[in-house]
Image (spheres, rainbow, N blue to C red):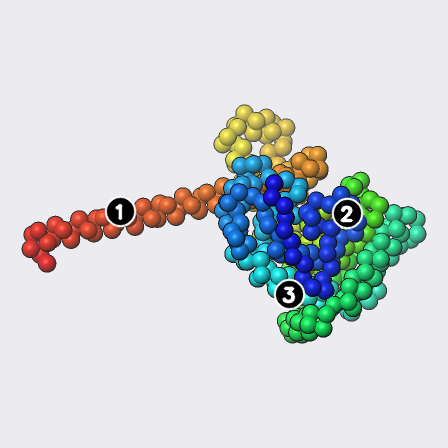
Amino acid sequence: MEDLRTRQTPGEETSSSDTLQPNVRGTAAVSSPALCAARLPLPGVMDDEGRVDESRLRMHIFKNGGVSPAERGLAWRFLFGMYPCSSTASERSLLQEQLLVRYKVMKRKWQQVFPSAVRLHLNGTDAELVAAVRYFDERQAQAQQQTQDQSEEVRDRLAFLELQAQILFERVVFDRGELQEAIRIIDKDVPRTNRDLSYYQGEGSGNLLVLRDILITYAAFHPEVSYAQGMNDLCSRFLEVLHSEVDTFWSFSCYMEKFSKDFRADGLHRKIELEAALLKELDPQLYAHLATDNMESFTFCHRWLLLGFQREFEHSDALRLFEILSCDHLELISQQVDRARYQERLARNYSTGEAYLRSAECLGIF
């Protein structure tokens, strides 16, 4: 497999995800700028300037049952839309800085409104959470030091981007009551995130606090969705793979643009109806059996669809399944078929027109 070639942006911190599959993973970095120029070693997927053929990427994921763990971090940044597939490596370097600054401005805005919510309140009885806070604080101190070590050129560029971000978000007003309630639920759910995963053990326990900040920032700036139970498990999946706070926030946000309705009161109702209709068509005997046991409402499928079978399969298999389901390859095939049919109709109409003109010329009409 081709080695991943990386270029680090001056003054920015390097995440352990820069090697995509590190041996030791502590608390996630704030950002992963070195990945901007990394090569995606999938045949025919990335050109020399770093552009990705989206159709080939999705096809590769679908036909190969996902990508390898070493390729997953970079592949997901394209798959879920944080990196536009049409972007070059140099364009992504600038985009990464913009996303970093915007996230910091967004996070700082809710922290200024709710200063008491900046830190997770501990009762002192959960030793793992106490250690998590310590590791998280160490990560914060390292990030601040790296910011101070930036060159004057980088500081000036980031200051300009920060000014733009402040203007962009200055009119955002929080519903204090709703956001306070969302923070309360997040603070209950985050400690319940699957801490048996190696990602959240040892120094990795600090990732629980990273996850918390991402979820609060998302809830603050997406009030129409806010926070609902289950989002912590879903966002945790992105954080584990991307191992970067900023990249996780934007990738999770892109995903939620398409699936946020699933977390609303009646969000999955239509999907479950379609699933029942599909089963009735493909396996009427099984459907009849479920109906006999009064299970035709398919409510037992709610968690499967909401979390992408995260709790129904072994963890690594669930990641691969989520990746395959998210590649939307069949949808792309359908679009390609529609385009091909359209081209055929154009060609047929053109041929018919040509034949008419030839006939008209022979008859002396023109």
Q: Quadrant of residue 97?
A: bottom right
Q: Which of marks 1 and 3 is in front?
A: 3
Residue reaching furthest right?
124
Residue hosting label 2: 25
Q: Which secondary structure lies at badge 2?
A: loop
In the image, what residue type sits under mark 1? Arg
Of the numbered discs 1 and 2, the one sitting upstream in the chain is 2
Residue linked to disc 3: 98
Q: Where 349 falls versus 147 (above or below)?
A: above
User: What residue is pinned by disc 1?
Assistant: 348
Q: Does any portion of residue 106 appear in the rendered image?
A: no
Marks 2 and 3, Cα distance to the nearest angstrom? 25 Å
- The quadrant of the picture occupied by the C terminus is bottom left
Judge by depth and name the residue closer to the eye, 284 or 330.
330
**Residue at x 66%, y 71% (from the top left corner):** 157
Q: Where is residue 81 in the image (x, y as percent from the top left)?
A: 58, 54
Return the x and y of residue 118 as percentages of the image width and height: 81, 62
Which mark lies nearer to you, 1 or 2? 2
Count residues near mark 3 (Cα–Cα under 10 Å), then give few for <14, some for 14-19, many for 20+. Answer: some
Lower sequence index among marks 1 and 3: 3
Mark 1 and mark 3: Cα distance apart in space? 48 Å
Give the SS element for disc 3: helix
How many numbered marks, from 0 up?
A: 3
